[in-house]
Image (cartoon, helix red, strand yellow):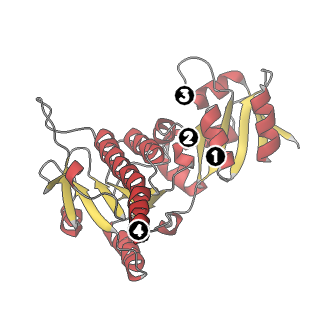
């Protein structure tokens, strides 16, 4: 495969730079940058389309990088070290490889709803790093996907992708203009027999998170970092739960709050799974006639 080269700040380099900080141009190109062994490997393993792989023109490639170039089947671009360092946005040196990745479609159908569905929705986030952190927690605790609604930070911002440490490529992250599209999607799922509960989180919730049944199919709502859930989302909640706190803190960071609720959902579901065999065994024993 032919290798392209970038040795000056030419038009191609400038176009790549826009993927870092220009949301509009990133959206028009429908591509974004990823860096790091784990994130790029996960992008390939999870079937994302890699358009280009950029690497240091003057540095021998590691075995991982050589294998990646073979596996990905993407355009190869050898970049002058100082230019690759600029694109890497790293404090010291450059990343070994940068990947130009094609954006996934913003279709809620990418998030699969089932009997044990656990979904997250982040309402109008302002910090891209929080989106990535929540995607990471969603991946860790078995959530099916993350929806980002409203006028919000961009999930494809490099800060978001970096904060996810690769989980961005494992968990569907879908942008939705407003609550209307999400509720239409949930309405279709409910009509097919999947009664997904919409559960908001707020310091003045009706129930403690540990007392609420999170084993049912549920979409958990996380509000804006400053103002919380919008009025529209509050009115659409079937339930609102809270995280009990002590000390002088008045609230938790959005990503921390999401992590706490996800952990509790995972804990409840594991506890249910461990009880089910015992209940089934007891029921079977009860039906066996005494000798």
**Quarter of the figure that contains the C terminus:** bottom left
Q: Nearer the viewer, mark 3 or mark 2?
A: 2
Q: Which quarter shows the N terminus?
A: top right
Q: Position of residue 35 (x, y in %)?
A: 61, 35
Inter-mark Cα distance, 4 to 3: 73 Å
Which mark is in front, 4 or 1? 4
Task: Kindly indicate whether the residue at mark 1 contacts the one at mark 4 (C-beta within 8 angstroms).
Answer: no
Q: Which residue is mark 4?
A: 290
Please name the residue that numbered disc 3 is placed on: 89
The answer to whether residue 24 is above or below residue 249 is below
Residue 68 visible somewhere in the drawing:
yes
Front-lying residue, 159 or 173: 173
- Picture coordinates of residue 115 (x, y %)? 43, 68
**SS assignment at label 3:** loop
For marks 1 and 3, the one nearer the N-term is 1
Residue 185: image location, x then y, percent = 41, 74
Q: Which label number is shown at residue 43?
A: 1
Find the distance from the CA under tag 1 to the CA under tag 3.
20 Å
Of callouts 4 and 1, which one flags the residue occurring earlier in the amino acid sequence? 1
Q: Decide which of tag 4 and tag 3 comes sooner along the chain.
A: 3
Closer to the chain start, of discs 4 and 2, is: 2
- How far apart marks 3 and 2 lie (CA) works out to 17 Å
Q: Is residue 177 above or below residue 93?
A: below
In the shown orientation, is residue 56 left or right of residue 21?
right
Seen in the image, is 236 located left or right of residue 68? left
Q: CA distance from mark 4 to mark 2?
A: 56 Å
């Amino acid at each position: 495969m032919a290798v392209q080269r970038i040795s000056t700040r030419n038009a191609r380099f400038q176009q790549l730079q826009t993927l870092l900080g220009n949301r509009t141009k990133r959206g028009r190109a429908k591509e974004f940058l990823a860096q790091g062994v784990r994130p790029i490997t996960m992008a390939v393993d999870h079937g994302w389309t890699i358009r280009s792989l950029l690497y240091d023109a003057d540095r021998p490639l590691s075995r991982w990088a050589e294998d990646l170039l073979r596996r990905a089947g993407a355009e190869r671009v050898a970049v002058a070290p100082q230019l690759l360092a600029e694109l890497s946005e790293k404090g010291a040196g450059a990343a070994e490889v940068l990947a130009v990745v094609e954006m996934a479609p913003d279709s809620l159908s990418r998030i699969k709803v089932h009997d044990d569905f656990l979904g997250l929705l982040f309402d109008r986030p302002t910090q891209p790093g929080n989106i990535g952190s929540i995607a990471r927690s969603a991946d860790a605790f078995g959530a099916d996907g993350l929806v980002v609604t409203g006028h919000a930070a961009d999930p494809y911002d490099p800060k978001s992708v970096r904060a996810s440490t690769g989980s961005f490529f494992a968990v569907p992250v879908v942008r939705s203009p407003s609550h209307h599209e999400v509720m239409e999607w949930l309405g279709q799922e409910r009509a097919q027999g999947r009664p997904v509960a919409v559960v908001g989180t707020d310091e003045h919730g009706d129930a403690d998170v540990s007392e609420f049944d999170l084993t049912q199919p549920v979409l958990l709502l996380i509000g804006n970092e400053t103002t919380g859930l919008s009025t529209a989302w509050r009115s659409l909640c079937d339930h609102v739960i809270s995280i009990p706190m002590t000390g002088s803190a008045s609230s938790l960071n959005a990503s921390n709050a999401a992590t706490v609720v996800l952990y509790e959902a995972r804990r409840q579901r594991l506890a249910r799974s461990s009880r089910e065999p015992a209940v089934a065994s007891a029921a079977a024993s009860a039906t066996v006639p005494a000798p």
